[in-house]
Image (tube, rainbow, N blue to C red):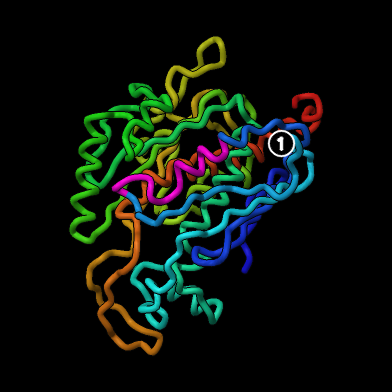
Amino acid sequence: MAGNIFGNLFRVSTFGESHGMALGGIIDGCPAGLELNLEEIQYELNRRKPGQSSIVTSRNEPDRVNFLSGIFENKTTGTPIGFIIYNKDHKSDDYKHIKNTYRPSHSDFTYENKYGIRDYRGGGRSSARETICRVVAGSVAKQLIKGIKIISYVSSVGNISINKSYQELDLSRESIEKYPIRCPDSLVAEKMISKIKEIKNKGDTIGGTITCVVKNAPVGIGEPVFDKLHAELGKAMLSINAVKGFEYGSGFYGTKLTGTQHNDLFNKDGKTKTNFSGGIQGGISNGMDIYFKIAFKPVATIMKKQKTIDKCGNSILLEGKGRHDPCVLPRAIPIVESMTALVLADFWMYKNLSKIKNML
């Protein structure tokens, strides 16, 4: 299986399955001498882990990361950073009923046909549990580009949306973390939580959107032509489980404007009066806020009977079992931020390669 490595200069390779012994990875290319706050890395993992509230899966995993190499006295040594997270609360018996059955909108059918074999326990490698490795690597990347601030929040659940721009919201950690849905608008957050609980009680799931804002990104991040900054961000976001859409800046709304309305005119200081470009022009950051929105589908496993087929093509009724998220959004926040950090760290390395030794 290819496709387990992300990045070029700052690169992460991940391994492991949802119901295997462990998941882990190797971070390659991180400069030596970076002082790491290991508690902050664990904090990010805690934001992603299951069992943290009544609106996510009840799987109970401590998700403690163990670093195996590349760090000495809390500083990076420049060698590969190896890490591992052990699975503690996997209940594989919950998946025996799909051993020979394809779940609707899951990867069961495609994996089996591509590889001739699949790990049906929790989806194996296709499980969103793989993203735990991205959060570890992304947390290290955040500390490498520590001057750049990455903030994500849930902006909609189903048809319940925040009807404010990100500039109108309090995007402090305290505001976003106040509610388990990780929405900084208190009135909207309560409606979102009620909606998710209602959907969960019906045995169903629901999707929504996450908005991500990057502040203090310097001018010059990104490479033109094939490696545009927004192209790499799009790839990173679309690699996350359940993501169905990505738009940055004015996105689809921009199609309704004229060029006169849409152009970002410059001030004397090089900043722009508007930011329909989303902080990126010609594939390169322009020093303004970078902002984008990601669409997540409803989780595919539902606790209702659905028609599907088995390996022989026989039509059967299948009902979901086990512990699953009724809505993936609150746990996806640190994943979105981590993938953003990995993209920015990779481009940051290109931009500062000659200066790195003197910067840390």
Marks counted in the figure total 1
Q: Nearer the viewer, residue 28 or 99?
A: 99
What residue is drawn where x is 63% and y is 52%? 6
Image quadrant where residue 253 sits: top left
| Badge 1 density bin: few <14, some 14–19, many ≥20, Cα 10 Å | many
What residue is drawn where x is 58% and y is 45%? 136
Left/right of residue 150 with respect to residue 6 in the rendered view: left
Residue 272 image offset from top left, x and y in percent: 49, 19
Task: Identify whether 144 is placed above or below 108.
Answer: above
Left/right of residue 342 with respect to residue 103 in the rendered view: right
Q: Nearer the viewer, residue 2 or 120?
A: 120
* Residue 138, magenta (yes or no): no
**Does the rendering let one see residue 8?**
yes
Left/right of residue 223 with respect to residue 250 in the rendered view: right
What residue is drawn where x is 61% and y is 60%? 15
Task: Identify whether 344 is placed above or below 52.
Answer: above
Residue 141 image offset from top left, x and y in percent: 62, 38
SS state under label 1:
helix
Image quadrant where residue 248 sits: top left
Q: Which amino acid, by three-letter code, is at mark 1?
A: Met
- For disc 1, the marked residue is 349
Image quadrant where residue 257 sits: top left
**Does the rendering let one see residue 107?**
no
Magenta part of the protein: which range? 40-55
Residue 156 image offset from top left, x and y in percent: 29, 41
Q: Nearer the viewer, residue 266 or 32?
A: 32
Left/right of residue 35 with respect to residue 77 in the rendered view: left
Q: Considering the image in quadrants, where does the N terminus appear?
A: bottom right
